[in-house]
Image (spheres, helix red, strand yellow):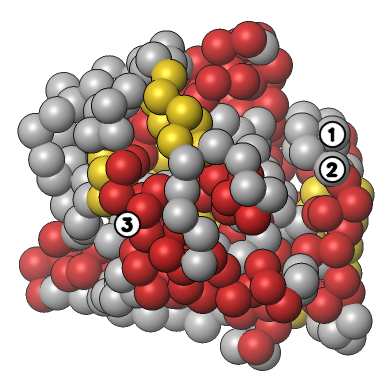
Amino acid sequence: MSPAAAAAAGELPARPFHKVLITGAAGFIGSHLAERCLELGAEVVGLDLFDDFYDPALKRANVARALAHPRYRLVEGDIRDRAAMRELVAAGGFDVIVHLAARAGVRPSLERPALYYDVNVQGTLSLLDAVRAADPAIRFVNASSSSVYGGLTATPFAESDENSRPVSPYAASKKAGEVLCYTYHHLYGIDTFSLRFFTVFGPRQRPEMAIAKFARLLREGRPVPMFGDGSTARDYTYIDDIVDGVVRAMERCRGYEIFNLGESRTTTLADLIRLLGAALGVEPEVERLPLQPGDVTITCADLAKSRRLLGYDPHTEVAEGLARYAAWLERGER
């Protein structure tokens, strides 16, 4: 069945996968995805650079559980190394590549735009070239971001919206990655989905991300920075729901598509701080600061396409997700 026919009929047909390459495998999303793929019976190769964007020791702790599994292999390398990527993909026998490796974060991208372009655009190109050279039948699932919608204020954001204008180098690099995926699908027939993640949170979240940073400050009895008046809002999405969506995309990747993965509801910054404080049993003290360049006022995912074609069904509300995150922090796990 063609993608167009499948779309008309409803949910895309699923195909099994047996061997997966996950880039950025030691990161927040990558480490959770690797464990889910292992649970599903797949063989997993994880690729990570272990750069110093945040403490590499945390990333190594993230992969400790997967490393103990006989069907997991960890490769340390740089996605920009074209020769190494060609060798890895050619020898891998992969059904699917899930490309999560990236230089992340809106605000840091303002300081180092060239680095973000190099890693996020050249790195994606390097992997697509490796697939083209090795086997264009490999499915390529690319991690994008809700930041590509830029300063849109009419919600929810739909994948078909052509009015999006990225407002940070990070967002622009993610949009460029989507365009490269389309180009390689058009030229070489590579099946590729790009997934626009909406503010993912949960255990192993990167330490500079808002929820992780706020939790650390609250537990230390320090004030939490609130940029603006607290009315900015995000579609916070719990890690388990994101992983469900990624796996569904891996199974159904055929043709070229873009999908939103979010919760399709928003929480203001002020409410997030209040809910996190409640989950941690702390009364938050707030430090009010001006809005930062590159920030957007709201994000909210239109999930109609993801629900229909992927069968994506997120269900973890923010308060529940924050309670799970707080419990994980108390247990001191990775």
Given residues 185 and 125, the one toward you in this image is: 125
User: Which tag, 2 or 3, sits closer to the chain's start?
Assistant: 2
> What residue is shown with label 3?
262
Question: Quick check: can you spot residue 19?
Answer: no
**Dot 1 corresponds to which residue?**
52
- Nearer to the camera, 39 or 4: 39
Residue 55: which numbered mark, if any? 2
Q: Nearer the viewer, residue 277 or 143?
A: 277
Q: Quadrant of residue 8?
A: bottom left
Res 50 → quadrant:
top right
Amino acid tagged 1: Asp
Report x, y in % for residue 92. Answer: 79, 63
Image quadrant where one finds the C terminus: bottom right
Residue 83 visible in the snapshot: yes
Q: Give yes or no for contact between labels 3 and 1 (Cβ–Cβ under 8 Å).
A: no
Q: Find numbered disc 3 in the image and state the secondary structure of the residue it sits on.
A: loop
Q: Secondary structure at mark 2?
A: loop
Residue pictured at 78% horizontal, 64% vertical: 62
Residue 329 drawn at (x, y percent): 66, 68
Q: Mark 3: which amino acid?
A: Gly
Q: Amino acid at mark 2?
A: Asp
Q: Quadrant of residue 97?
A: bottom right
Describe the element under mark 1 as helix, strand or loop.
loop
